[in-house]
Amino acid sequence: MILFPNAKINLGLQIISKRADGYHNINTLFYPAPVFDILEIVKSSERKTTISVSGIDIKTDDDDNLCIKAYNLMAENYNITPVKIFLHKNIPFGAGLAGGSSDAAFTIKAISSLFSLDLDSRQMRNLAAQIGSDCAFFIENKPALASSRGEVLTGFDLSLNKEIVIIKPDIYISTAEAYSIIKPNADVPQLKSLLQHDISEWKNLIVNDFEGPIIKRHPEIGKIKDMLYEKGAVYASMSGSGSAVYGLFDQLPDLQDIAQDYRTFTGKIM
């Protein structure tokens, strides 16, 4: 079974408060993005589930890989046998694009199908939420407002229908680093209401709270965002806790000068 786990972008990201469990309450909108890994999962005659990774070197032990964690979680709850997992990494890590979470969610969906478990979306979301805060989003993989740690999802009717450019500088930002420099603020306009405005107004309304402090540490990210606006983006933002920056366009611009300096992804975002 071969699947193509996709990335996500954040439309706005409000850090509301720090929780007693050490996490943060957030408001954001997750939106599927057309950057893909390749995931193949087959039943195995071996005694243990294994994973082989190609593409981007993610430098992780098997037991730390989120696909393995997803399998192990399902093995604790269901009668399944070992599998072989082949993962080709294309979605950058440390980018705010949630590639690892997507891989884990698609592993859950694949194993449910491979072993005829017939799990419904609610069951798979509950499993995914135990792996990562944004993992549950990829089960249904549709635009959704996310609150609490990011695992409480509410479907949101939005169709961007734009060209997207995603730029990944050679900067790695861990989620822990990003949250360590952010100051929560509960006194913000409701993101749901802001998203009702025309996209041409988002530049002055919809903010990723991570951007300010992270751009102070990594000015290059701010320069990339400015560059996307200079090329005609109707909206541009850092995704998640960074470091990837995306721009939404009516028409795809000339990117030759950018592509020679940065890893660049383009596609149609529906």
Image (spheres, rainbow, N blue to C red):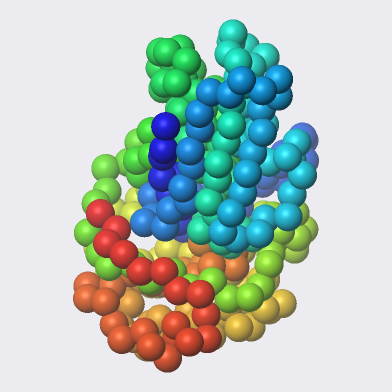
Residue 140 lies in what quarter of the image? top left
Is residue 206 shown left or right of residue 19? Answer: left
Residue 103: image location, x then y, percent: 53, 42
- Identity of the residue drawn at 62% across and 12% down: 77
Residue 178: image location, x then y, percent: 70, 60
Is residue 188 shown left or right of residue 198? Answer: right
| Residue 201 in sight | no
- Identity of the residue drawn at 64% across and 83% down: 219
- Identity of the residue drawn at 77% across and 44% down: 61
Is residue 181 shown left or right of residue 71? Answer: right
Of residue 60 and residue 226, the one placed in the foreground of this image is: 60
Give the total number of marks visible in the rendering: 0
Of residue 108 and residue 225, the one placed in the foreground of this image is: 108
Of residue 12 and residue 66, the one placed in the foreground of this image is: 66
Residue 84: image location, x then y, percent: 59, 31
**Residue 259 vertical placement versus 171 (above, below):** below
Q: In which quadrant of the rendered image does the C terminus lie?
A: bottom left
- Identity of the residue drawn at 75% across and 36% down: 63
Residue 263: image location, x then y, percent: 51, 75
| Residue 162 in sight | yes
What residue occupies the far bottom of the structure in this picture? 257
Residue 183 lies in what quarter of the image? bottom right
Residue 73 lies in what quarter of the image? top right
**Residue 11 vertical placement versus 46 (above, below):** below
Q: In which quadrant of the rendered image does the N terminus lie?
A: top left
What residue occupies the far top of the structure in this picture? 79
**Residue 207 vertical placement versus 38 (above, below):** below
Is residue 80 shown left or right of residue 257? Answer: right
**Residue 110 vertical placement versus 247 (above, below):** above
